[in-house]
Amino acid sequence: MPDPSTISDPAATVRAMVADRDAAGQRLDRWLASVFPELSRSRVKALIEAGQASRDGAVTRDPSEPVREGSTYRLGVPAPAPAAPAGQAIPLVVLHEDDDLIVIDKPAGLVVHPAPGNPEGTLVNALIAHCGNSLKGIGGEARPGIVHRLDKDTSGVMVAAKTERAHHALSAAFARRDLERSYLALVWGVPAPAEGRIEAPIGRHPVDRKRMAVVPRGKPAATRYRVLRAFGTAAALLDCRLETGRTHQIRVHLAHLGHPLVGDPAYLRRLPAAARALDPTLRAALTGFPRQALHAASLGFTHPATGARLRFDSPLPPDIAALLSRLGDGRDE
């Protein structure tokens, strides 16, 4: 890494630190994140992989490299750059907004951030248009402000950061699971017992890499569930709480339990046995539901600036509410 005086971007900074005995052997990204607490570990990792870190003058790109006692490490932190995605005037339901963060009620069908196949029309595009310059560059990625995500067809509460401090604090809270999150899930059949805990490791499906699966060498994952309402033996509305945050965790765990989400295009592979006893019209309503029936109903966290404990709730969206009403009217309870 060049000397600070030779950095082409005059707004960039280079931070240096000599590793002491306590640092020796730690992962480089973990140690640098502890040394520079204003930066999240994911941000530090990205900077290292981009060639912005050096050890004793030699560039290193390995975030897992063990720290060497006595070595001098430098980390270059470029000035926040304008976010790559462009702002788009997409309506948002804002539950709360202040100088540090924004909480929104995401509708089903809205992708969180640009990706291949969805280069625009995302929540990030909407946030950039709504927040303007306050959001640009936060997080140092092409997904400014994003600290967690919901699947495209999952609705409900999300929080985004508007400052680097908030991004770091909220990212850390999600990593530690130091927050409250509840989901409402409509599933096929009725789980027994009515309240339980699913603990099963999750990783990429061994054949279909676009899906996740319970696999022996997956990452540890645990989900708590509770039956809120049963509709005969055909379906049930569950309250789900995450102990970990793996991709598609609730969807994978409930399918593994034998109670896949109604409408799940990835993890509902065949017509459930619970559907056979239903009235044909009601069965068609459930099998034809166009998305996974999953809703992020609440989110609670500590405000990164004030320290106040906040909680936000989102009512069931009209499509799931209407489906529950039809199930109730069907008198299958």
Image (cartoon, rainbow, N blue to C red):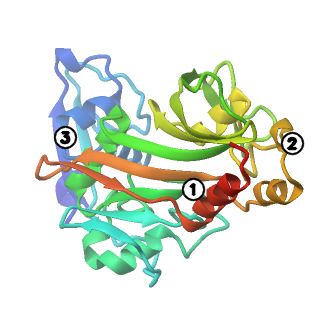
On screen, residue 26 versus residue 222, left or right, reads left
Q: Residue furthest front?
A: 331
Crowd class of label 2 (few under 14; some 14 to 19; many from 20; radius 10 Å): few
Residue 277 at x, y percent in the picture: 87, 42
Residue 232 at x, y percent in the picture: 72, 39
Pointers 3 and 1 in contact (CB under 8 A)?
no
Q: Which mark is residue 36?
A: 3
Query: Residue type at mark 3?
Result: Phe
Q: Residue furthest bottom?
A: 89
Pointers 3 and 2 in contact (CB under 8 A)?
no
Residue on which the image places disc 1? 154
Name the N-terminal-most of marks 3 and 2: 3
Crowd class of label 3 (few under 14; some 14 to 19; many from 20; radius 10 Å): some
326 relative to 170, above or below = below
The label nearer to you, 3 versus 2, is: 2
Query: Residue type at mark 2?
Result: Ala
Residue on which the image places disc 2? 277
Q: Which mark is residue 250?
A: none
Crowd class of label 1 (few under 14; some 14 to 19; many from 20; radius 10 Å): many
The label nearer to you, 2 versus 1, is: 2
